[in-house]
Amino acid sequence: MAQWMKTLAVSLCILTILLHLAPENHFAKYVRFYVGLLFFLLAVSPVLELLGSGEELDRLLQLEFLKEEYYDLESAAEGLRELKNEQIQEACRQELKRQILEITDAYGLTVASVDIRFGEDGYSISSLSVFLDASDGENGGTGIAEAKKEIAGLYLLPESDIVITEQR
């Protein structure tokens, strides 16, 4: 009983210090709640042990902590899945831009910028705009038509969804 009283007194001092160290923003109410809960559990534990419910309380608390850890792990895994999808989509977009630059370069066209619009899945191309440097000169007209056909065939896009224009 004396040990319980000492534990209760020391815990009360530590919990009071924690309350004073907690910032005075919206987290303070959560700190107060959990500190009060811990103090209540410390105060009630000898009574529960006398009634034979101490082991059951420990088991229930352990199960609740395990559930909380599982929920944290599940939400972290979901965040990683979303991050992974975003990274894959960005890598796919960069690769498509590189391929389009390579195709236009093969037809002697100098690209100033590429604008790719993707479908709802985030991977398939819905439309494409390529802006060429004005210095392409006379080869621009035939090269543009050939590059447009090549891109349409490769990415299975209607030619009407591909716009290749010269910037002036």
Image (cartoon, rainbow, N blue to C red):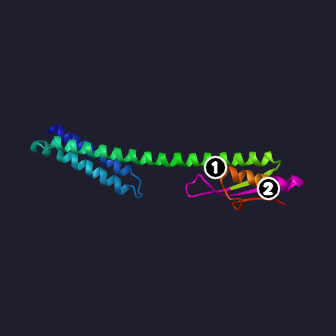
- Label 2: state its secondary structure: helix
Is the residue 91 above or below the residue 159 in the image?
Answer: above
Task: Please give the name of the residue rendered at 79% of the width and 46% of the height, measured from the top-left corner.
Answer: 105
Front residue of 140 and 7:
140
| Residue 113: image location, x then y, percent | 75, 54
Task: Please give the name of the residue rendered at 18% of the width and 37% of the height, measured from the top-left corner.
Answer: 3
Is the residue 120 above or below the residue 76 in the image?
Answer: below
Within-10-Å neighbours for mark 2: few <14, some 14–19, many 20+: few
| Residue 128: image location, x then y, percent | 69, 57
- Label 1: state its secondary structure: helix
Q: Earlier in the sequence, mark 1 or mark 2?
A: 1
- Residue 134 painted magenta: yes
| Residue 104: image location, x then y, percent | 77, 49
Specify the label residue 158 is tagged with. none
Identify the image quadrant of residue 2: top left
Distance (Cα) linking label 1 and label 2 = 23 Å
Read off the magenta span.
Answer: 116-143
Quarter of the rendering occupied by the N terminus? top left
Front residue of 157 and 71:
157
Task: Please give the name of the residue rendered at 18% of the width and 42% of the height, measured from the top-left corner.
Answer: 5
Which residue matches tag 1?
93
| Residue 29: image location, x then y, percent | 35, 57
Quarter of the rendering occupied by the C terminus? bottom right
Q: Nearer the viewer, mark 1 or mark 2?
A: 2
How many labels sit on residues?
A: 2
Kind of residue sitting beneath label 2: Ala
* Residue at the outermost left position: 51
Which residue matches tag 2?
145
Kind of residue sitting beneath label 1: Arg
